[in-house]
Amino acid sequence: MSPFCGHQGSSGPVWVALLLLCSMPMPSLGQGPTTAVTSQDLEASEGSDVSQGSDASQGSEDELLQLERLAEDSFVQDDLETAIVLYRQLQGRLQARSEKVRILMTIAWLEHLRQQNDRAQETLVEAFVLNPDYEFRPELYSESFRQLFVRGQQQAIEVRDQRAADRISQGFAQLRAGDYGAARRVLQEALRLVPNHPKGLYNLALVDLYDQRSEEAVAGFQKLLALADSGTAIDSSLRALSLTNLGYLFIQQGNYEAARSALEQAVALDAGDPSSWSNLGVARRRLEDPTAAAEAFQRAYQLDPDNVATINHLALAYIDAEDWRSAVALLRQASGKFPDNASLWLYLGLSQLGLNNGEDAVQSLQKAIQQDPDDRQGRASAAAIHLAQHYYGANQVRASLQAADQALAWRPELVNGWIYRGLAQRALGDAAGALESLQKARSLDPSRAETHNNLGSVYADQGRMDEAKKAFEQALSIDPTLEDARQNLNRIANGTRPPRPSQAPSPPPRAADRRADDRRAGDRRTADRRAENPVAKAPPLGLRFADIDYSSLGLKGAMVEAVNSGSVAERGGLRSGDLILKVDGQDVSSADQLRDYVATQNRGSQLTLDLLRANVPQRLVLTLE
């Protein structure tokens, strides 16, 4: 019991107050939770809104106990004004939330006794802002104070909501500025003020997403959606954005089924967001559902017809489904609107090949090479491979060999380049060159049955029948349905050789191979070759960026998805998951912007990259050689 209980020298209203206080539980300092709270926690963040007296330091426990006794003695002596001042000083020195709230409640009661009800209500608001769940025993207080208590609770809710909203806005501004640590701290303060605040939860999960804390981001968005499922009123657009973000994260993790489910829910809630549809198309395409992917990309295209990335995605979905006419119609219009885009010309040429329109296809593929003359985007080498395939099928063997050589000069890791080079060499009678090229293709990708079959044919040309037989058997072990390899084995068993290369048009690449080529579009390594110009252009960085459409959030940066072995990027220290924020001091808003900037540099020059890696700012210097 407090030391002033039992005082007999007072009468009137003050005596009634003393009786009430004596019956109230008055824990002394140190009872209850006493965990210290840092200056970054809620008490400190709210401290500027609380009158704390002249001395805001914590002080020793003995000093604090002495100050509390002085305040209680002043109360006993009916000096309420002095008691309030002393309690204010005490409250300002305390750090434990429970102790601060206890003292604030005492101050409010004393202010009420002095008939300072406006100040009492302000003090109650202070207390409830710190602890909205304070346990109140109304039977110990007068009716008038109970009314103040209820009004204080209600006003505190409004204050906490407003302060939380202010911190959420501040956190989002820090997020956009790339200061993820500060954004996280401010948003956590907001959630201490209003737990489960929908926008606070969403923005905190968004910070984790851009800070590459994918597991935390997934948990944050899922928590928000679970609240909605449990009946919490959450705006449908916020739920749709959360589902879109989940879909994006699941795509990054390779969990395409979960991504499709989340994104289908997102577009059901908000059918007007093109990025949701585009990402849904990506998920469906990775699940090898080209028809459904095309439907999603069509919706994205309808909503944002000038988004070149969406056009390219839609074209690839048509190509996967071998809907050549739809692809050609789309790409003719798009290439006319965006004639400098190499990807559009590449996909147009591939689609025209699908329609057996070889003459137009050659023109389109050559356009792709013109728009990507140094293969910085990987489109020129891909176009050259398709030209090599077309020329070989059209019996223009030397042109096929030339196109394959051109592709391999840019990207010596292209398996199809070595295959068409070997086929052309075999057709021209260069058995040794064909053998070398096809062995190179096999070393790059030993899982290709066609490569083993072609090698077997070259061995048979040279009379090396045992090696030819092994090669054909290896081809069949990889793909038992490869009829050419089975027939070649039968010919060897019958004492004959496989026929010379057929001049019949070869089929277009399989959809799976095209998808693999598209995913590797950014994985470029340039062969050593001399430039014709006095100053050599810089080589590509040799990395792939995440190709998910995230433009709707308005956040900047280029996220690295993969880094090629031996590339400029690897030698410079870049890693998968790095988020590049600046290049040579300039903000990076997209992967395309970064590529365009690198394309203006000369071989031997240096790039300074500012990036975030696992929540830690980094600066790397890349030498373009």
Image (spheres, rainbow, N blue to C red):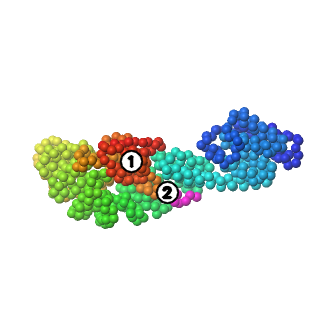
> Is 464 contained in the magenta span?
no
On screen, residue 155 above or below 431: below
Depth check: give the residue in front, 170 or 34.
170
Q: What residue sits 72% from the left and 55% below the top?
A: 151
Query: SS for tag 2?
Result: helix
- Work out whether mark 2 precedes mark 1 in sequence or the reverse, and give the earlier one: 2
Tell me residue 267's x, y (percent): 46, 61
**Which residue type carries mark 1?**
Glu
**Marks 2,1: beta carbons within 8 A:** no
Depth check: give the residue in front, 82 or 73.
82
Q: What residue sits 47% from the left and 42% below the top?
A: 616
- Residue position marked by numbered label 2 in the rendering: 241
Rounded to the nearest angstrom, the CA distance separating label 2 from label 1 is 22 Å
- Residue position marked by numbered label 1 in the rendering: 561
Is 290 placed left or right of 481 in the picture? Answer: right
In the picture, the quarter occupied by the N terminus is top right
Q: What residue sits 21% from the left and 62% below the top?
A: 358
**Which residue type carries mark 2?**
Leu
User: Badge 1, how many Cα within 10 Å: few under 14, some, many 20+?
Assistant: some
In the picture, the quarter occupied by the C terminus is top left
Tell me residue 343's x, y (percent): 31, 57
Tag of residue 333 = none
Q: What residue sits 65% from the left and 55% below the top?
A: 158
Please identify the quarter of the rendering in which residue 302 is found: bottom left
Tell me residue 497's x, y (percent): 12, 48
Using the rendered image of the protein, determine whether residue 433 is visible from the camera's viewpoint.
Answer: yes
Please identify the quarter of the rendering in which residue 354 is found: bottom left
Query: In the rendered structure, which segment of residues is drawn in magenta?
Result: 233-238
Tell me residue 26's x, y (percent): 76, 41
Is 140 placed left or right of 351 in the picture? Answer: right
